[in-house]
Image (cartoon, rainbow, N blue to C red):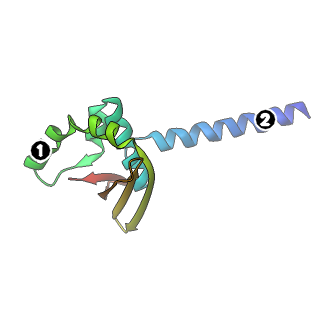
Amino acid sequence: MKKKLFLISLLSAMLVIGLIAIACSKGEGSPSDVVKQFYAAVEKGDVKTALELVTYSSPEKEKEFKDLLSLMPGIIAMIGGIVNTEESINANTAVVRVTSKDGGTDRWDLVKIGGKWKIKH
C-alpha cells in the first residue's frame, strides 16, 4: 500500500513539474501565458527573454521597441502587475486584454509563428 501511494505521489509530482516547465517555456502556452511571461521577464530585467517573445513588423519597430523596453520595468512597478487577463483567439492571431492592479487596462496583439505565440509590434 505504501509503495502504491509513493508511486502515485511521484507521478503527481512529475506531472506538476512537467506542466510548470511547459508554462515557463518561451512563447509556449496560451496567448495570455506569453503576455504574462513578457511582464515577468521585463519585471526581472530579463531583456533577452522579453525580446524573444516579440515579433516586429519592421527594423524600425524593433529599434523603437528596444528603446521603450528600458522604461517598462518602472511602468510595471507603477501599475502593480497583472491582476487579470482575457484573451480572444482567431486562428493564428489573438488579442489579450490585461487588467493591472491599478485598474488600468492594456491590449496586446499576438500572432502564432512556428507554433509559438509572439507579441506583435
Query: x, y percentage for residue 67?
Result: 14, 38
Residue 11: image quadrant is top right
Alpha carbon distance from label 1 to label 2: 52 Å
Observer-nearest residue: 56 or 70? 70
Question: Mark 2 sits on what residue?
Answer: 7
Image point (29%, 35%), residue name: 73
Q: Residue 64 carries which label?
A: 1
Query: x, y percentage for residue 41?
Result: 35, 36
Query: x, y percentage for residue 99?
Result: 40, 54
Seen from this angle, which residue lies furthest bottom?
90
> Can the viewer see residue 108 in this picture?
yes
Observer-nearest residue: 20 or 70? 70
Given the image, on which type of amino acid does mark 2 rest? Answer: Leu
Given the image, on which type of amino acid does mark 1 rest? Answer: Glu
Image point (34%, 62%), residue name: 95
> Can the viewer see residue 28 in this picture?
no
